[in-house]
Amino acid sequence: MNGVTSFAPILTLSLGSLVYLVTGKLLERTKLAAFLAFGLVVAAIAMLGIIPDSIGESEYGLIVNDFSRLLAVVACVGALVSLVSTRAAVEGEGIDTLNEYYFLALTALSGALVMIFCSDFLSLFIGVEVASLALYCLCGSRIHRGISAESSMKYFLLGCFSSAFLLLGIALWYGATGSLSMVPLAAVPYNAMIFLSFLMMLVGLAFKVGLAPFHFWVPDVYQGAPTSVTTFMSCVVKVAAFAALLKVLVLGFTYPQPWSFGALWVLAVLAMTLGNLAALQQRSIKRMLAYSSVAQAGYMLVGIVSTEYGSDGVAATLFYLVSYCAMTVGSFAVLAAVGPDADGVDSIQGLGKRSPLLAGCLTVFFLGLAGLPPSMAGLTSKLFVFSEALSAGLYGLAIIAVLNSALACAYYFRIPVAAFFQSAPAQQTQPISVPLTTALALVLCAAAVVLIGLFPEPLLALVRDAADSLVGP
Amino acid sequence: MDIGWPPLSFVILLPLIGGLVCLGPWFAPERDAASRLCRTWSLVVSSLTLALLLAVAQGGMGAPDVLLSVSETRAWIPSLGIYWNLTLDGLSLAFTLLTCVVSLAVLAWSARPAQAGAGWYSLLLIGQATVLGAFLATDLVVFYCFFEAMLLPMLAAMALWGGPRRFQAALKFLLYTMVGSVMMFLAILYIGWKGLGVLATHGAETIFAFDVTTLSTTKMLGPDEQLWLGLAFLIAFAVKTPIVPLHGWLPEAYREAPHGTAAFTAALLGKVGIYGIIRFAMPLFPGFMLEAAPHLAALGAIGVAYGAAVAMAQRDVRSLLAYSSVSHLGFCVLGIAAATEMAVTGAVFQAVSHGLVTAALFLVFGAITDREGTRDMDSLGGLAARIPVGAFFLMVFSIAAVALPLTSSFVGEFLVIIGSWQAFPQWTSVALIGVVLGAVYTLTAYLKVMFGPEREPATASDADLQGGDVLVLGALAALVIILGIFPQGALSSISPAIEVQLAQAAGSVEDEAKAQLRAPLSAEVTVQPARLESAIAESSR
Amino acid sequence: MGSGDLRLSLVVLAPALGALLSYVIGRRSPKLSGVIASGAVLVSFLCSVLLWQQVGATGSFTATLSSWISFGDVSLPLQLYFDKLSAVMCLVVTGVGFLIHLYSIGYMAHDESVARFFSYLNLFVAAMLVLVLGKSLPVIFIGWEGVGLCSYLLIGFWFANTEYAKAGRKAFVMNRIGDVGFIVAMAVLYTQCGTLDVVELGQGSVLSKLPAGLAFLAGLSLFVAATGKSAQIPLFTWLPDAMAGPTPVSALIHAATMVTAGIYLMGRMHGIVELDPAVPAIIMWVALVTSAIAALTALAQNDIKKVLAYSTVSQLGFMFLAVGAGQYAIALCHVVTHAFFKACLFLSAGSVIHGCHHEQDMRRMGGLAKAMPITAICYGVATLAIAGICPFAGYYSKHAILGAISGTTNPLLVAAAPFIGYAATAIAVCTAFYMARSFIMTFLGGYRGEGHPHEAPLVMTAPVGVLALLSVIGGFLLVHPITSFVTGPLPATAGEHGSEGFVSLLIGSLPGLFGIALAAYLFLVAPREKELLRRIFSPVEKLCGGKFYVDEILQVLVVTPCRKISGIAFRAVDQRIVEGSGSALGSVTQAVGELTCRITTGQVTTYVLLMFIAAAAFFSVFSQVR
Amino acid sequence: MGSVVTYVGLSLVLFAIGAVGVCIRRNAIVVFMCIEMMLNAVNLAFVAFSKLQGNLDGQVAVFFVMVIAAAESAIGLAIIIALFRNLVSVETTDAAQLKW
Amino acid sequence: MSFMGFVLSAVAVASALGVVFNRNPLYSAFHLIVNLLAMAGVYSVLDAHFLAVTQVVVYAGAIMVLVLFVLMLLNLKAGSGRKLGIFRPLCAIAVACSVVTTVYPAVESNFKDLSLHELQEKAWRSEGTVKAVGEELYGRYVRQFELSSLVLLIGIVGAVTLSKRKEGKIGPREGGLGGGK
């Protein structure tokens, strides 16, 4: 029975999506269709609450524990918020195939859940592919826009290329251990092959997470994809990919050699530095947020680098991940609400007058990304991650990280400044009407960003449990 | 002292909530009416805050010979040892009162940026709340949060209503402070992490891993740690203060900001740096501070002279005030470096006094330059006859800026100079160059603006300062002079707190010195014998 | 001491209050403001007289106004201290001050800002009284800075004239340089002796805490402070410029009282000044040079106030000669007599200027004795006094100074004492000469100006008359009590000057007589010889007329470099390096960022290649790391 | 045994050739084919390892990879067609509107 | 390596090079078909019979037909005029060589202690008959098997989504970037 229960949320989503594909066709172009999709996500979340933890190691390739449950909930909630907040925007973006759109989103989410729940490499790979394939399609779903197709193509080719590396890594692991399971095998001696297999999986997953120097797809895809899709993927893909990365790395850490240190250190530094430096140059907000996501992934990786010394590093990373999700979903959702083609900084100039709510939320999110009060989530996450880095003795890394976060303020601030302090171009001064659902979702996000930081203990307890269940206390 | 309700949190929350309330009318359609309402509202809130603060201080004072100390604690992130710890002692009282007074003055000042409306009051109140928070917090993380947060309302006001280059100025301000403060952030985390470990072994039930008073008793930081962590703290505070040569953000920021913001920034934000060094750096890194003292003194003294020299070359009134701030705050740095009770008390007094004086100067010059439509001193002149009241107040505050006796600045500068002389006579002498140059640029500015023949015939538009503003300036002037004639009350409230800070530092140094005596070969910390003795004497007293 | 407290406080508070009232009331009714101000000073004067009578030769009163800078173990209360020494100064300040106030009522009657004027004037008196009454150095410093401020305000009283305002600023800044000396002295003394109380600082046990080098520093710093306030080299050039102020101001501040603050300070702190014999030696030489230069400069001045100003500098030099010689009482004596005759001279000059419709150039005067006989008499009497002619006040003090120089016991000066004595005598001749010259040019001969000069009103002539009288009898009165009147806490004077016979009196007056005679000869009897002499000495005259180019030298050596440095600090250091480094860092970051962006070419093939390279690098690098 | 490991070598070579192809070809369809070749190469490695390890997990993995490759080809070619519709080209170098 | 295996490997490598270095996409596709068939041969040499058959059916049969169909549909000309630079291929080849030379020794060293006997033992257990593989698929890997159906579904729906078009909406790009540089 174990295998069934662990499969339940995924089944809910995937079977549900199938049902939706059929019934949604009947409800086409009504709000009901969208709400049916939301209902499915809610049901999945409910399922996540119900299912029990796996006893021992799962034999069906999936495992339920605090870690996967937490991240699954985060992914689902993130998906829900992004779908709800962009519901109105999707129609405005000219995506004709709403039915397929929600279907693909639901399947992408179920793929993400597979990545989160996986306990063997085959599930991991299938999960990655399910999520990726659905997202390739979603990126191109604004089919009449050149950049949408372009982003889809780039994502597809690069994604498949990196999947090949991931797969080669899995093959090497299999070759070395004779098993596809993610269980550390005491009998298998540590050798170069395992080492290389980890490096290859790292490369493959670093691509999915969007770590420099495997980040090239991120800006292009984030910018080219419809904003609603970007909103969705910025959260769901990030969570799932980090879950997978964490699983792989924790497995890697069980081998005594500090093999990971150099590679992860370099990845983190490159991601932070290149991400921030490039973001500094952007005039396109989506692109800037994309580069920022690269940089933020770098900060999170700082937590993982310190993981070698205990589960607190993972906990810090998870905390960061959760608060980052809230901020990034919110930022993109605001952009989506501003308009289907809102991208350049000029498009949000004067937003404070056109819609104080959107501008206010945007400011909260961007301050959070910059790690400044009053959006305390950003600050406390940085606090946890950097303090883990320090306690692990990674002073150099911590210094690079904080200098980067200071540098990042330069571009994060540009957005609130444009929203509040610069006047709108003549042709876009009319107020923006924000649908109630969007407003609600955004306010919730903003509240989360503030409150997670102000009262971090509950979430901190959760991520600690999660980290313990992943690493072992 | 247990009052039953958290009075210090209220001191912070009152203006914060008041400011947030003002955010609503900012977007209201009836801007003028809303603005007037908000003005009254903000004045009430700010006055209440001042009253509350005074009441808390009064209540905390209790018996005359008991040290003022009101504190409250509340769990924030207990699993990491982060607590919402606030303390009001003589040191923080001085700065919090300054904050309240200056905020009230800026809020009451009639001239504010055109089209500012309710947002102006909102941002100022929020700014007041954050600065108050920074002055009250003893938990390093809480302090850091306020330290960062107080930047934002000022930046917003600057970006909204500043001069033509406001965005660049704001960005520069932001980046300078951020680069400075993130290193401190890291240092705080390191200290907290270490503190958590060290304090856990003591077996206390609640671990204030980030609380400065708790941490300073542990003496857990070795010389190398003190060096790097202390450096991080110092740089953060040095940028904020600013200490030469980290003042690159300052001229442009003061040039571009609206008067009120400039006054607020100059009078209060910089003081957080001074306060931070005394409150945090001195007890946490006593050995390092002792080592760094000569360098710090040098920077302070050079700052005094350099700021004054550069101020002499200015034509823009604001730039002049900016550099004069650098110069005057150099005295504070010098006093802190000297680390005698007299000098540090003087430094605090000087900081408070500079806050009052510089805020008033920014406001008066602001009113004048607005009226005349230029900030170039060379194109001003002959105003004394046209605006006698303004000229009078400008004279009073210029005199105070020059630190003539019976103004508060004199007391501060005098104590700093006398107190620093015994430690660093050479650097104190350098600072004295600034005393002369200070007179030069201040009087030159006054001469250029006020004296000389009238430029153009008086018109109806150039009315003199009006009722409310005269009241504000009068109050500030009265404070400056009262503090100059009767400073003993303030001094005797500040100095015990300073004594405590110094004793904490000295206690740690003493231990280090003892450790050194035991292991004479490890001569990593070179302690100046004379000052060590005095430090020991003080701590034992 | 109980009764002393209130009266002593009143001495200071009366003019302070007067300053407030004369302005507040004076704004409504300008006439009253002079009266109030004069009344306040009169009250102060009467209190001083009362106290002076009660204080014994070595007694004192103390009044505590505030505990001021007191906390922890620091205790610097705001206390006033009245002993014989302060008594003399007090009496001079309030007495002469009162007369000048009275005079000002007439002089400033037609000015718009008369209320402001009297307010400043009263404030000045209050500050000056704080200066002379301060019990500790910081309190003296209050007065010290206070008089400086009032001087600044009064010099620039007619601020619409930028030059006047600049003169005020110059005075303040030069004083400020001296103040640094004062501050250094305080710092040294507090650090070493642990107290700044003037009484304690006079005690040997306290002074013995001062190591040799620091004793020199402290003494010298105090003298630097005194050079600022009392216009000695190199800080004297502000005083002639200070004549920009209204003439009563010049009389009160820049002749009678404020400029003597330096001498008072030396007297007050004589214990410290004498600790290191090098300090009096320096004082002596500086004083001599100042005195000489000022006297020579005065020779070539045509502005009547400038003559008096340089004369003041020269006379202050004389006082410092006595200080250098260790005869503080004599110095103080000259302070008193100088206050009388110089105030009289200035006020007379004021009357002349007033009468000649604000003409100050002596070349456009002449023959005014007819038009204003009282003024002429007063001016004449005062001239005789300053020249050191026997029965007049100046004789006694000046002669005593010359005696003191020869009697110096300072080991560093003994050898040079005769030379200094001769030089001082020569200066005395010079003094007599230029004063006589000014008298002749102003009052004798024919009128060379325009309009009709007229005599001043009674309210102006009366004070001048009183001062003239004092110039006559002031010295006489002081002859015998010269010790008892002023010495008090000061070391006793050497030698008696009052008991000398007629011949010696005459001999003592010789330099003065010679100078006057020479002037009379050249200007009245033999103008052609005068022209001849002028041609012979034209370079010297040029030098004198150019004030020995001290201003220019200071400009080149101090002011211009300061401005240069300031400009360099701003433009090169601050804008280029400090701000520039920030901007440069920004630009570099931007450039690197730009580069980072350029990698992202938008070409999938590039991305793939880069990723492939990165991956391969990962594999090969990190598989080696193990 | 050596012979089976050689197949792993073959798979690596094919993988590398495929990767080179992805790097140097501009035609999206060819790039896609090269990627398929890479996946195929990994499949070969799986099969070889399956033989070396003596279990069938590797072969099962290959089956799934094939399934995924099939779905991938469907989507990939649809994307390429969509791209062609917008750009009238399948050259990846022409699709470079998103950059920097 | 058996003779058969050697020949097939040689064919595979040669055809792979053909795929990469042929100018004409169509020829590349044909080369790929050859490559895939050769791989199928290698599978059967390695006793993975089920996979060999599937390879022919799925890859060579289904996928390549699709590719060829698209190539025909789009009717592409042989390679665009622009020349490949020499730097990029060289770079790629060098990197590829480095990957192979890094990974292969690691693999080889991992298996160098494997005895022939052991290998044969294992080979027997890993014979990929339909039955054996099927048992695995419907046993331990049933969840993944179910998920693979989802993958195919996404393939279908995705292809439909992307291929939809409004009438007459074929042509050059529409609109530029929202606010790019």
Image: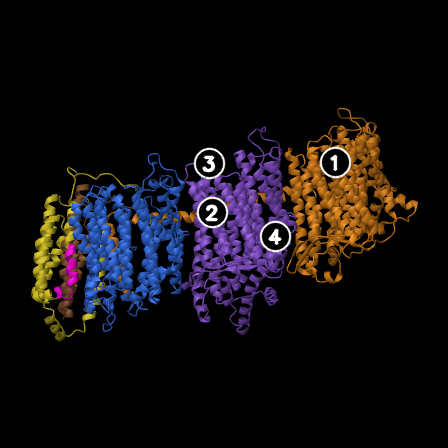
Chain colours: A blue, B purple, C orange, D brown, E yellow
Residue B5 x, y percent position in the rendering: 49, 57
Considering the image in quadrants, where does the C terminus of chain C appear?
bottom left
Residue B96 makes an appearance in the image = yes
Label 3 resides on the chain identified as B
Q: Residues within 10 Å of mark 4 (few under 14, many from 20)?
A: many
Disc 2 from disc 4: Cα separation: 34 Å
Circle 3 sits on which residue? B32
Q: Residues within 10 Å of mark 3 (few under 14, many from 20)?
A: some
Of the image marks 3 and 4, the number of the one nearer the N terminus: 3
Dot 2 falls on a residue whose secondary structure is helix
Question: Decide: marks 1, 4 in contact (CB < 8 A)?
Answer: no
Circle 1 sits on which residue? C34
Give the amino acid at mark 2. Gly
Magenta-tinted stretch: E136-151
Disc 1 from disc 4: Cα separation: 36 Å
Where residue B189 sits, quadrant-wise, is bottom left
Does A472 sit above or below residue B473? Answer: below
Q: Is E150 a magenta residue?
A: yes
Disc 3 from disc 1: Cα separation: 50 Å
| Residue toward you, A433 or A334 | A433
| Residue toward you, E127 or C526 | E127
Q: Nearer the viewer, mark 1 or mark 4?
A: 1
Circle 2 sits on which residue? B18
Tell whether C126 sits left or right of A353.
Answer: right
